[in-house]
Image: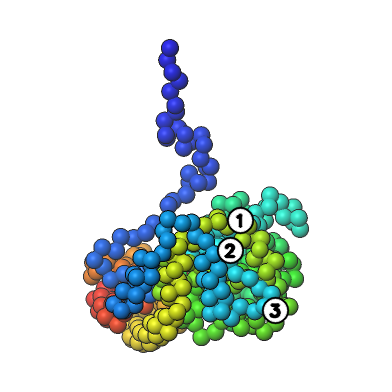
Amino acid sequence: MNRPLAPSAEALVQQRIRSDVQAMHAYGVQDPQGMVKLDAMENPFRLSAELQAALGARLGAVALNRYPGVRVNDLRQALAQYAQMPSGYNIVLGNGSDELISLISLACAVPRDARTGQKPVVLAPVPGFVMYAMSAQLQGMEFVGVPLTPDFALDVPAMLSAIARTQPAVVYLAYPNNPTANLWNEADMAQVVAAAGACGSLVVLDEAYQPFASRSYWDIVRAQPEAHSHVLLMRTLSKFGLAGIRLGYLMGPAALVAELDKVRPPYNISVLNCECALFALEHADAFAQQAQAICDERARLLQALRTMPRLTVWDSQANMILVRVASPAGVDAAQRVFEALRRHGVLIKNVSKMHPLLADCLRLTVGTADENTQLLAALEASL
Ligand SMILES: *Cc1c(COP(=O)(O)O)cnc(C)c1O
């Protein structure tokens, strides 16, 4: 008797895996081996030797044999205090904001939106953070991207008409935005936030770059919570200085946060992440000094970049700078400069193919003084 053979793994991919997933590309992480790594908005500073030793002792004492328990509530409380969460609000933690974005999609992905009879829509300005679209589409939601103006401001009439037309379930507003590094005009923001509220959309304010920004929209939300019952604030410790530990948090009216909490995997924050984040908040002053050093370096970089020929340089409220390389017809100058920098040992991000508004653009993360000096020298040599 022949036992039935199982289909090949390739055949199973065809038969069992969603065709949209088959068509996707896995998220690419560049190999930085020995390079100056200025591609991912990481904080370039590590902890002092003294803090490293203290953290090591703390982590060594953690009960790794146990599932994460109530210690996570200490962290929720510490973050709520750090971010001045108002009363009546609650906080949910994610394994990075990436996971929170997935949870929002998961919780909101009804088959048909009752207002439109269509697939629910997630709406955001573009170019923006790619995870909003990716996570929406994976949960069967429709992503609608509304182009920014050519100088990367919110296109308010276009946003308002897209909101009215698509009645989005969720509107994402990154403040500052990635990769354009700017804050939206506050009055523009207010119009978009109000229009979303009026049609029953949730608004997720993504303030990943808050440590480097001159304003936070959270101040406006906290001043008028009744007008912002549809607004959720998402932040992360990634750009703060802990990209490696994966910790994002989201605050909003308790009733909304409670629903998101139901779809969260129960042990999504490891005991090590939790203890490390608590340690970092106890030493928030050390991280604030790092953020200040990054802002100072950002000012130096901006000034130096603005003296370089062939570069258009935009202002930044984040730990990254967007530049455009003047490109003669038929020449992919952004790719050429990207590759030349790589040959000089400097890794940045070529965003020129992400969106037509970003044609010929490169995104530079602000590093240490030394790293920025190397970046500037490599750019001089490459332009
Ligand atoms: C980097 C970034 C995040 C952070 O994601 P994590 O998963 O917390 O590392 C969130 N939003 C935007 C716009 C970002 O650029």
Residue type at the position of mark 1 = Val
Q: Could you tell me residue 70's position as x and y percent?
A: 54, 64
Q: Residues within 10 Å of mark 1 (few under 14, many from 20)?
A: few
CA distance for labels 2 and 1: 26 Å
* 163 displayed left or right of 377: right
- Of the image marks 3 and 2, the number of the one nearer the N terminus: 2
The CA distance from mark 3 to mark 2 is 27 Å
Q: Earlier in the sequence, mark 1 or mark 3?
A: 3
Q: What's under tag 3, amino acid-wise? A: Pro
Q: Residues within 10 Å of mark 2 (few under 14, many from 20)?
A: some
Position of residue 283 measured from the top left corner of the image (x, y, whole percent): 42, 80
Q: Residue at x 73, y 78 (%)?
A: 226
What percent of the width, then of the height, locates residue 101?
Answer: 56, 62
Instruction: Provide residue 364's location: percent of width, then percent of height.
Output: 37, 74
| Residue topped by disc 3 | 225
Q: Which residue is mark 1?
A: 263
Q: Is residue 191 visible?
A: no
Count of marks placed on residues? 3
Image quarter of residue 223: bottom right
